[in-house]
Each structure stands twice: as C-alpha cells, then as structure tokens.
Image (spheres, rainbow, N blue to C red):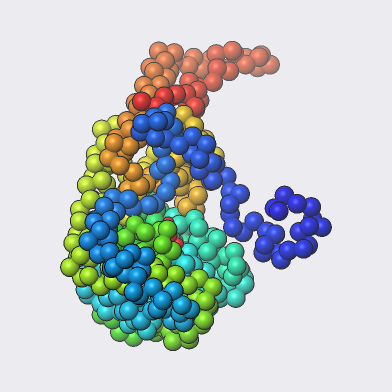
C-alpha cells in the first residue's frame, strides 16, 4: 500500500498512507538481516544473533513451573474449565475486578512496597505501547509537544506521534554526566519549544531508562514533578522496567516521589505507563497499564480501552498468578539475581578487550561505548560501524542514533533474550572484532611512525610533492577493515 500510486493514497487517511509507523526506517535493516539468517546454536552457528530485542527470557522457567503447579489458573484445563463461561462472555471495559486488584498490588510489590496503587485507576491497554498511544490521545492535540530526554526508546515516535500527532522534542543529555537529565537541559528544551510557538503538553521519561539501563534519582524526579506543576505540563513516566532493577541504588517510582517529596505536586498531571512485557517477560500477552492520578484521564482512557482490551482469559490467569504474593516475591528476587548475573558477565567479557558500557543497574541491555572505534565522530561513521557489526560480526545491535542519541558511537546491546551459550558466542564475536580492530590500528600507527611526513613545502608555482598526497594510514581504518567470521 505504501508503494501505491498517489491516487490510491487518496483512498486512505493521511495517517494510514503516511509512514509514521516507522517500519520503513533504516534501523530495521538489522532486523531484516536477522530474519534472513537467524543464529541457532545447533543448526546455524554462522547466523546473526539478535541483540536488538529487549526481551526477558531469563526467568520464564519459574512461570512455567508455577503454571504446572496451578492448572486451575487456566480456563483451558480440566481444573479451570468450570470458570470458562464466566470468563468467555463479554466483559466490561473496566476489566475483571480481580485482575485490577492483583495488578495494583503487583505494581506496589515491584516498587518495593513503598507505595500503593488504587485498582480503580488501573486501566488496561495493549502493552505499554497501547498505554502511550492512549495517553497521547488523552493529553495532547496534534502539533502539541512532549519533551523527551535523549537517548530515548525509538518507538515513542510511533506510539505518541503516529495516531495522535504529538511532536517529540529532545532534551539533550550527554555522556559527560552519564546522560543524566538536568534542570538546565529541561528548561532549555522548554524555552526553545516556546520560542518556536510550540505548545508543550508533557514531559515523557522512561525510568529505568531504555536504552541506558540506569535509573533516575529521587531529586531528578522531584525536579520534574515540580517543573510539571509550575508549568502545567503533564509528566508521563514509563516505568516498564521498574521490576528489572538488579543492583543498588534502589528504584524510585514517581508514585513515591509525589507522595513523599513533592507534596504540592499537581497530581492531575502525573501518569504512569506500565506493562508485564519486561519485568515478567510476557510481551506476547500484551498486558499494558495506564495509571493516571487524573480522574478525567482515567475515565477517557477506560473508554478507549475498548480498542485494546486484554483478553479476559489472560486477565483471569494473571489475576491468579499475580495475587500469589509469595511466588511473586520469589520471582522478582530471582529475576533480579539472574539479570545481575547476565549483566555482570557481559560487562566483564567486554572489559577483557577494553570496551566499556555506561554503568547501569537496570533493564535487559547495556549501553556500549564504541566511540573509540569510529572512523570519525559523526553519525554516518556510527552507522557505518553498525553495518559492519550486523553483516560481518553478525550481531544485530542498535545504534545510538536510533535512540536519538546526539553523541555518535553508543550502541544498545540486549543480552537477556538468549541463553548463556549464545551470549558467550556473541561475546566472543565482539571480542574478536575489537581485537582485530585494535591490531589494525596499532599496525597503522606503527606504519605512520616509521614514515614521518617530510614537510618540504612546494616551491612557489611547483606541484604538490607526492608524499603529501598520501592519505593518512588512519584514514584506511574504516570499520570495514576487520572482518570477523562467526565462531
Ligand atoms: C521503554 C519502553 N516502553 C514501552 C515498550 C513497549 O512495551 P510493550 O511490549 O508492553 O508494548 C518498550 C519495549 O521495548 C520499552 O522499552
């Protein structure tokens, strides 16, 4: 359809005919390459390893075990079939009361029991994706803007903009302070937008951050809540990784901050997006939550949830599992332990070849610093290196530019979506690639050292001496040079 004639395009809405979904972005090249040649430990060890997918597969065995022990939790078993009719009928769009109750409790449990959530404010959506779309619909008109700290989750461009027409304006953050959001950067982005005549309706943050794997501290969250109140803009907090914090410092939710730290906060402006896709590893279930402190937003979002209801069968199952508090506590603790082990192993493996990642304590990925491997400090050079990593190193990682990162050379690498053995193969490939790159660089530098440039200037009117026309050997160091074959 996208490739159809313009006459065909007029048959559709502007939004449908446009490419706001982002699927045609070049960042999907890595995914396409992966789809064509998927790595498999036994059948295709030369394939591409998927490290661009923030999926948590590390603790699914615990859920499988729970399912085996609780056949009554599913209406599709002999033990649960007596509930079949009740669950299979039309449900109202509020959702099953027992599901909202269990979800509210779980959201509190994930946040260390420091805050409670009201089941009457829990609104269902199709994943956190649906939650953002719903919130954008409720909070902003087309052309209004959200300010978003960079780097940020790329699909926000789809979720907030495609249907609702919200503009996302970056709040520039930098590696010099570990990409921490500062008040100066926020004020500067806000003032810039105002100068351009753009109405700022919200600030959208992801805490813990995708792609950084870091959490926001209490003071930053308090600053945001205060700013939102003073400027009457919404504060939307995507807390989808709240239960995927695996090391100190502890996670702080905006829910806690508005209760304890900013008593004067206008709560009508505060909204949380959550889902079970990451902390629980169930992205296929499409269980998302809009949790708003604003009654009107709750009411509107509820009506809209007719478009993205979670199946009652899923609600029924999850209501049972999430309300098993003992299991949930065990699951969260064990999941954090496994995420920590995976993260630490990955970081240690990279350190062996001198590659660092931003210090992180959350999420399913690391923010890898390959600035030292760039041909030059440009986004083009980053994409060049990225293509080599996909096609030669055979890892589908995500370049920083896809997260709107303003500093070239950062890459997000997911490592919780695979088994230990696959992760070791991926690590081997990266190390091999980096070593080859280091060797080529050392060789080029040695070559340069043994051939000092003789700067004899041309005589007036004379031709440029040929030795001055020789390109620097460092220029030969394109990321294409080191070829790595899968081990
Ligand atoms: C920050 C963030 N928000 C939302 C989503 C989408 O989540 P869901 O699968 O629940 O729609 C993701 C998935 O990667 C994410 O990282």
Q: Which quarter of the rendered image does ligand 1 occupy?
A: bottom left
Give the residue furthest to the right: 7
Q: Nearer the viewer, residue 37 or 220?
A: 37
For the point 75% across and 52% down, the residue is 4
Relative to 155, is 97 above or below?
below
Relative to 471, is 1 above or below?
below
Q: Nearer the viewer, residue 254 or 272?
A: 272
The quarter of the rendered structure image containing the C terminus is top left
Q: Nearer the viewer, residue 171 or 410?
A: 410
**Quadrant location of residue 352?**
top left
Residue 10 position within the rendered picture, expressed as x and y whole percent measured from the top left: 78, 62
For the point 33% across and 64% down, the residue is 77
Residue 155 position within the rendered picture, expressed as x and y whole percent measured from the top left: 50, 58
Residue 286 position within the rendered picture, expressed as x and y whole percent measured from the top left: 43, 63
**Quadrant location of residue 108?**
bottom left
For the point 71% across and 66% down, the residue is 13
**Quadrant location of residue 152?**
bottom left
Specify whether 420 is left or right of 169: left
Specify whether 409 is left or right of 257: right
For the point 67% across and 64% down, the residue is 15
Residue 24 position within the rendered picture, expressed as x and y whole percent measured from the top left: 61, 49
Can residue 94 be seen? yes
Can residue 216 be seen? no
């Amino acid at each position: 359809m996208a490739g159809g004639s313009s006459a065909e395009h007029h048959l559709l809405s502007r939004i449908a005919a446009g490419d706001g979904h982002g699927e045609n972005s070049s960042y999907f090249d890595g995914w396409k390459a992966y789809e064509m040649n998927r790595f498999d430990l036994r059948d295709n060890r030369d394939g591409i390893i998927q490290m661009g997918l923030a999926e948590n597969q590390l603790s699914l065995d615990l859920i499988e075990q729970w399912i085996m022990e609780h056949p009554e939790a599913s209406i599709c078993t002999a033990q649960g079939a007596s509930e079949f009719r009740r669950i299979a009928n039309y449900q109202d769009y509020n959702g099953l009361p027992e599901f909202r109750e269990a979800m509210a409790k779980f959201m509190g449990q994930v946040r260390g029991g420091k805050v409670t959530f009201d089941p009457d404010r829990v609104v269902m959506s199709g994943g956190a994706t649906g939650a953002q779309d719903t919130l954008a619909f409720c909070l902003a008109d087309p052309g209004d803007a959200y300010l978003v700290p960079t780097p940020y989750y790329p699909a926000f461009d789809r979720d907030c903009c495609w249907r609702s027409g919200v503009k996302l304006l970056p709040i520039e953050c930098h590696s010099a302070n570990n990409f921490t959001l500062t008040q100066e950067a926020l004020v500067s982005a806000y003032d810039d937008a105002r100068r351009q005549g753009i109405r700022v309706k919200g600030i959208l943050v992801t805490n813990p951050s995708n792609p950084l794997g870091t959490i926001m501290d209490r003071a930053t969250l308090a600053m945001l809540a205060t700013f939102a109140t003073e400027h009457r803009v919404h504060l939307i907090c995507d807390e989808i990784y709240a239960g995927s914090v695996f090391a100190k410092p502890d996670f702080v939710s905006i829910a806690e901050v508005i209760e304890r730290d900013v008593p004067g906060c206008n709560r009508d402006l505060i909204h949380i997006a959550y889902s079970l896709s990451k902390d629980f590893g169930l992205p296929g279930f499409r269980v998302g939550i809009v949790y708003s402190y604003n009654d009107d937003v709750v009411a509107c979002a509820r009506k809209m949830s007719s478009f993205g209801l979670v199946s009652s069968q899923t609600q029924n199952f999850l209501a049972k599992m999430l309300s098993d508090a003992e299991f949930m506590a065990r699951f969260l603790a064990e999941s954090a332990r496994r995420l920590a082990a995976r993260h630490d192993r990955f970081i240690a493996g990279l350190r062996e070849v001198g590659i660092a990642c931003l210090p992180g304590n959350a999420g399913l990925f690391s923010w890898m610093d390959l600035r030292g491997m760039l041909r030059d400090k440009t986004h083009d050079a980053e994409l060049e290196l990225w293509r080599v990593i996909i096609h030669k190193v055979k890892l589908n990682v995500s370049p920083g530019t896809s997260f709107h990162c303003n500093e070239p050379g950062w890459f997000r690498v997911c490592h919780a979506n695979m088994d230990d053995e696959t992760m070791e193969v991926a690590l081997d490939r990266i190390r091999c690639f980096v070593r080859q790159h280091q060797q080529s660089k050392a060789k080029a530098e040695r070559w340069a050292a043994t051939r000092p440039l003789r700067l004899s200037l041309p005589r007036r009117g004379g031709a440029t001496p040929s030795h001055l026309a020789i390109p620097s050997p460092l220029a030969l160091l394109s990321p294409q040079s080191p070829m790595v074959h899968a081990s």
